[in-house]
Image (cartoon, rainbow, N blue to C red):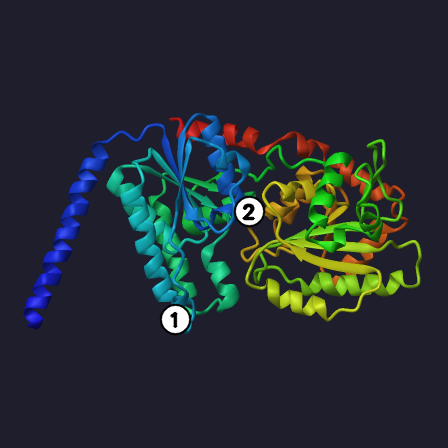
Amino acid sequence: MLEALFLVCIILTLSVLSFILLAGIAWRKMAGDGIIHVVVLGDAGRSPRMQYHCSSLIKMDYSVELIGYGDSELIKDLRESKQLLFHRLQNIPHFINTLPGLARYILKVLFETLSLLYTVLVWTRKPSHVIVQTPPSVPTLFVITVTCLLRGSKMVVDYHNYGHTILALSLSKDHPLVSFAKWYERFFARFADLNICVSEAMKKDLKHNLRINAIILYDRPPSMFRPTILLKQHELFCRLGIEHAVFRTQEDVQNRENPHSSYTTFTEKSCDGVVTLRRDRPFLLISSTSWTEDEDFSILLLALEIYDQKASTDNTLPKILCVITGKGRLRRYYEGIIAEKNFNAVTIYTLWLSAEDYPLLLGSADLGVCLHKSSSGLDLPMKIVDMFGCGMPVCAIYFNCLHELLRHDHNGMVFHSSEELSCQLEILLKGFPAKNITLTKYRENLSSFQSLRWDHYWNLHILPQISV
């Protein structure tokens, strides 16, 4: 009986391998010109860089097939494009996430491998190129390497960071899985036809550790990230105020019977339709996050506590509304800590915004805070790029290559501790809403950054590589 079962397994295995081999021969004869795949083994709607790749490809008249999870909405350009096919991966079954550590990891990787392999081979057309995001590298690089070899497509790897350094945040640098992930990334790096990375520091590290050459494609904001005009600010705050009370005022409630005037926490619209900023508005502080281990929000919370204490004795320091946007598994943990705080001059509010409202809120804010501390010290935070695109200065926590994007006392400030961030907030907020000389200088210094957008850099560095 066992021998017969074993024989059946061998026959089935050989049949599957034969099918894949024959299909691979047929695929390699097919033309894939004009079709490009973009792969992200994560929530595609929360992967802005990969969405921007899609957008730029579509503008160059390529047919794009995006492969990823569909938990969040894509940007408007992609939702409305007829040149984009979005293949949604099957979400990981809930029972796998309830298993203990090693079993969960192994079954998760196995499920993702089969799901990605099935989606690529069964549901997509042969592409000329596949642009794949890493991390996550496991099992993405393995699957895409195999499918590109079968189909004769070129693999383009976009290094945002290293997968093994992110894994080390939840395990340890010496954990066997981290060592395996490090070897895995080094092994599969050799199969890429083109490598892209996000910083000069990462380019040097890829050359030194993985022995590969990479093109630097700095993150730059698309045109949707820009300062928000007053009318749009007022409309945004009115819209957000329907669900989020921090954006509306008692005056707005009392005047709802008058459709010609309206009020928000930050703006007011008169009967003749003129929108102005309120003199008594709070300072709008913004932080964006994925609520992961590489962002320690206790630093911001302590800084705001220190600020709150000082504001109680210094009437030149304004009230702060700190809005933290984003999704992630640590969100509830930090929301529990925030709920226990007893501030007087500070309000902290967490929410998730649509792809259309997020840039509008950034363009309405006064200052950004970034707590992203790169696990490798080699990647640059996209959130700072978005904020800079909106002309908003940023206070960011220090890490090795941050200077490639943010220059201290030029377009923002760099801090190392809660105490230092609190001091910076005092300097930049003092006297608000009167104009702050330092903040104004930082905004003016961002004009050159705002003039160079994503499409400019993409057309300059990537288009020539995939057009060959």
Location of residue 123 in the rendering, given as x and y in whole percent from the top left corner: 30, 42
- Residue type at mark 2 is Ala
Task: Give the secondary structure at mark 1.
Answer: helix
Seen at 33% across and 55% down, the residue is 113
Mark 1: which amino acid? Leu
Q: Is residue 233 above or below residue 71?
A: above
Q: Which label sits in the foreground, 1 or 2?
A: 1
Q: Is residue 291 visible?
A: yes
Quadrant the C terminus occupies: top left
Q: Quadrant of residue 108?
A: bottom left
* Residue placed furthest toward the front: 257
Separation (CA) of disc 1 from disc 2: 33 Å
For marks 1 and 2 on the same chain, the one whose residue lies earlier in the sequence: 1
Mark 2 sits on what residue? 201
User: Where's residue 231, x and y in %?
Assistant: 76, 35
Q: Position of residue 466 (x, y in %)?
A: 40, 30
Is 145 rendered above or below residue 374?
A: above
Q: Is residue 300 left or right of residue 163?
A: right
Please tell me whether mark 2 sits on a helix, a strand or a loop: helix
Give the quadrant of residue 257.
top right
Q: Is residue 442 left or right of residue 288?
A: right
The residue under the point 6% across, 69% down is: 3
Q: Is residue 395 among what the camera can see? A: no
Badge 1 density bin: few <14, some 14–19, many ≥20, Cα 10 Å: few
Residue 125 in picture, x, y percent from top left: 30, 36
Q: Which residue is mark 1?
A: 102
Q: Nearer the viewer, residue 333 or 219?
A: 333
